[in-house]
Image (cartoon, grey):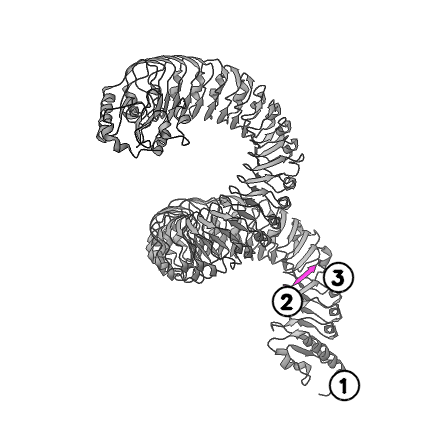
Amino acid sequence: MAYSAMEVTNITADQTALLALKAHLTDPHNVLANNWSTTASVCSWIGVACGAPRYRVSGLNLSHMSLSGYIPSEIGNLSFLAFLSIRNNTFQGSLPNELANLLHLEYLDFGFNSFTGDIPPSLGSLPELKSLLLEANFFSGNLPLSLLNISSLQTINISYNQLHGFMPSSIFSRSSLYTIDLRFNELSGEIPTDIFNHLPELRGIYFSRNRLSGVLPPELGGLSNLKTLRIDDNALIGNVPSALFNISAIEVIGMYANLLSGSLPPTMGLFMPNLRELRLGGNELEGTIPSSISNASTLAVVDLSNNSFTGLIPGTLGNLRQLQVLNLANNHLTSESSTPQLSILSFWADECNLKGNIPNTIGNLSSLIALSLANNELTSVVPTATERLTNLQLLNLQGNQLEGNITDNLCHSDSLFHLSLGGNKLSGSIPECLGNLTTLRHLNLSSNNFTSTIPLSLGNLAGILVLNLSSNFLSGSLPLVFRQLMVAVEIDLSRNQLSGQIPNSTWDLKNLAYLSLATNRLQGPIPGSLSFAVSLEFLDLSLNSLSGLIPKSLETLLHLKYFNVSFNVLQGEIPKIGNLSFLAFLSIRNNTFQGSLPNELANLLHLEYLDFGFNSFTGDIPIDIFNHLPKLRGIYFSRNRLSGSIPRTIGNCTMIEEINLSENNLTGLLPPELGGLSNLKTLRIDDNALIGNVPSALFNISAIEVIGMYANLLSGSLPPTMGLLMPKLRELRLGGNELEGTIPSSISNASTLAVVDLSNNSFTGLIPGTLGNLRQLQFWADECNLKGNIPNTIGNFSSLIALSLANNELTSVVPTATERLTNLQLLDLQGNQLEGNITDNLCHSDSLFHLSLGGNKLSGSIPECLGNLTTLRHLNLSSNNFTSTIPLSLGNLAGILVLNLSSNFLSGSLPLVFRQLIVAEEIDLSRNQLSGQIPDGKWGRMNLAYLSLATNRLQGPIPESGFAVSLEFLDLSHNSLSGLIPKSLETLLHLKYFNVSFNVLQGEIPSEGPFRNFSAQSYMMNNELCESPAHRLNMKRLVDMLKDIKQSFVVSISGDIHGKFNLEILRTDRIRNNMEKFAKWRRESLLNATDKIVNDSHNVLANKWSTTASVCSWIGVSCGAQRDQVSGLNLSHMSLSGYIPS
């Protein structure tokens, strides 16, 4: 064919434009390089099409050629181009404005590339464009308004980009539009109400995964040709327009993951003969599911999950013969007594509040592929009818209340790849036959009550990816068959009772990423073969009894992100872990590791949590580690023996949230850089030897929740603005330091404070009245030298749980405002100078379990209303001036553990109501003026360990029966008790202290049981008490025993032989014959003897027996001819008591 000169020139212009494009491309397969040649006609080039009548380039299709590069401006010279597609390559850069020169262009497809920048407004100058496809790039900016100029536009797809801004209605004013796809962008604002007024031909709307808000325009219901509506995953609110369910052409409705509310229309489904998919899950819809839904007879997918639907699951769902997926999960639905016959492939009803049994008619669903009824309240057993579900691939019944055993019926579903029965109450053995389900990829039996060993048959599951048997009662050792699970990605056997060692030959599992053996009873070393699991990302061996070293071979687990061996008995030093560069969590807590902290920690650039607490590390904290851990969120070095100062480089960890360095030997000043850690939530540096001021900037961290610095040597005062900038502070523990000055009133601005401990400091001044503004407070300020009154504004602490102001110098009265502290559980005001009566106001705190007002000057009567505080476990009113009788109402305190009314002026008799205190462990009524007899049969029902009735005016006999067998301390001294000491007390086998001195008792002292151990001091000033024959017999045996071993003196004892006694040493005329036996008894022996003496009341030996003087000069000691040998020891009449040492 012959061409005119003009035609040749024009085709040459097209060739030049295409060669310019080729020059800007990278062509890895040389497709264009070998074909686009000037020796051949342009129209024969790959991807190029030419059209009549001018025989110019009319089409360019370079899709799917793995090309990359840029679109040059010369593309605009292809002036007759009608079709342009470079889809699915990796072109980048921005689009040239010269595209606007392609006035004949009808189809533009730049989808699935890497273009960036704004969409050129010049595209609005393409008058014949019908399809604009720019999806899956990185375009940003707003939708250009110029697109409304394209009157011929039918399809616009700019999905999967980064467009933002509002959605202008003017863009969609062209009646020619068929499809609008703006999915997966960042468009915001409301959908304009008039957006659909001019779109009569619209077939598809795709607005999913944006940030759209507001209500759905009711005009949606007027789109009579609409087939697909996808507006999922936005923030749309309000009702679904009911007219939408009257569009007969509609095939797909997708609105899941919004905030839509209201109910579905009762006629839904009557006018939708073509509806295939209904996806309304993840909203706030309520009401019942209309039974008319079954009229949409072509429905294949129904997803109404994660709403608030109530009522019955419609039985008419059984009429949907094409239904494949039904998801009703997370609603409040109930099932009818008869299950609808559904010809479905998948049934999902998770979290639907379903109750009752799973009916055996489930076996009639012979085509069922997936059945998920997770997280309901289903009971009974796993139905045996599952054996008829031969096509079942997924069975998820986790999170119910199923009981009983797993039967072999389940093993007939030989297509099963996912089986999850976790979180039930299943028991018995794990069936061996599960090993026959060789198609299984996911097996979850966790959180049940299985008690067997792990079946060896599970080794047959060669294709298993996930195996979770955690949180059961499985026992036995780890089976070697795990070595056969070669493709497993996750194995979780934690929280069982597995024992024995971890096999060393099991872990050549190249794909294993997650392994947890935590919380078992495993022993022995960590096997080095774990390093063969080269893909491991998560390794948890914590809470076992593993011993030995951490194997150095684990240094090769380069993908490891989580490593936890805490709570074992591992020891030694830490291997070099600096090459584990992906490690984010590292815990070796509660072991016996020692040595210094490894400097290699600085190489763990991704580390977020580091816990070396409760070990024996020594030395300084390495300065450099905090320079290289930018992601660190938590550091825990507590309970070690670290010394030196806290490195100032800790200020570089700007992401840190928790610091715990407590219980070490750290010294020096607190780094001021702590005040710059704006994300810090918890700071615990208690129990060190830190000095200096607390950095004031620390109290400006708005994120801080816990500050713990007690038991240091910190000094200075608290800043006057403390609390103004700490809205989240819950605990402030500064006790046990050397802080001084006043407590700032601004502390009350930290409105969430629950615990304040300023005890054991040198604070002065008044307790701030503003503390009354703290509504969630536990306040501890013991031994703070506080003076003045307790302000009545204390009653404003309506949520106060604990208030302790013990051992200060507070005066006046117990504030009446305590009646408003209705949540108070602990009130400790002991050791002050409070006066006056206890009023009934105190009895309004009906949550009180600990009340201590001892050591004050309170007077009057003990209020009867205290007996109404039935939650009390500890009541201490000792060392006051109360003068009443003991209120009978105290018998109502059935849960009381400690009752101390000692050192008052209480009178009257012992009330019988004490027999009601059946769980009490300690009762102290000593040093009062109580009179009358000790009631018999009163004390035996209790768990009492401590009972003191000493120093009263009690008379009559000691009760023969009734004392609790658990008694360890019984003091009845300094009364006027008479009669015998009951032999029944010999049965109190736990009794360690017994005192009946200063009474008028008589008769023989019991000699058995605990009475073998009591000294004469227990009985002194009872002139008519005497030794029993057993005492005398035991005395003779002791003397004979001493003679048998040929000691140089005879011991004469009054009191008990086997324990404490008064002693006399008598010289005998046999000393000379036995002197050689005494030759080696020197100073150490005598000093050891004095150490054993319990009571040297006159300090006779304490002052005279000293290593600075000669033994022979000591009181009571005499030496023979050779001065270094003791020949006599006379300690008679010295009021000594104690033990004779060996």
Give the side of residue 1008 with respect to residue 195, left or right. Answer: left
The residue wearing badge 1 is 4
Gap between marks 2 and 3 measured at Cα: 23 Å
Element under disc 3: helix
Q: Is 137 one of the magenta-colored residues? A: yes
Label 2 amino acid? Asn
Q: Position of residue 249 (x, y in %)?
A: 60, 58
The residue wearing badge 3 is 146
Element under disc 2: loop
Q: Residue at x 59, y 28 (%)?
A: 797
Q: Earlier in the sequence, mark 2 or mark 3?
A: 2
Asked if residue 63 can be seen in this view, the reply is: yes
Crowd tier of the residue under label 1, counting other residues whose Cα lies within 10 Å: few below 14, some 14–19, many 20 or above: few
**Residue stretch rendered in magenta on the structure:** 136-142
Along the line of sight, the residue nearer the viewer: 506 or 237: 506
Asked if residue 256 can be seen in this view, the reply is: no
Q: Earlier in the sequence, mark 1 or mark 2?
A: 1
Label 2–label 3 contact, CB within 8 A: no
Gap between marks 1 and 2 measured at Cα: 39 Å
Which is closer to the viewer, label 1 or label 2?
2
Q: Position of residue 964 (x, y in %)?
A: 34, 24
With respect to residue 567, does 24 lie above or below? below
Crowd tier of the residue under label 3, counting other residues whose Cα lies within 10 Å: few below 14, some 14–19, many 20 or above: some
Along the line of sight, the residue nearer the viewer: 1090 or 501: 1090
Q: Position of residue 1094 (x, y in %)?
A: 37, 26
Give the side of residue 784 with respect to residue 967, left or right. Answer: right
Q: Position of residue 398 (x, y in %)?
A: 43, 49
Q: Residue furthest bottom?
A: 2
Q: Which mark is residue 113?
A: 2
Which is closer to the viewer, label 2 or label 3?
2
Element under disc 1: loop
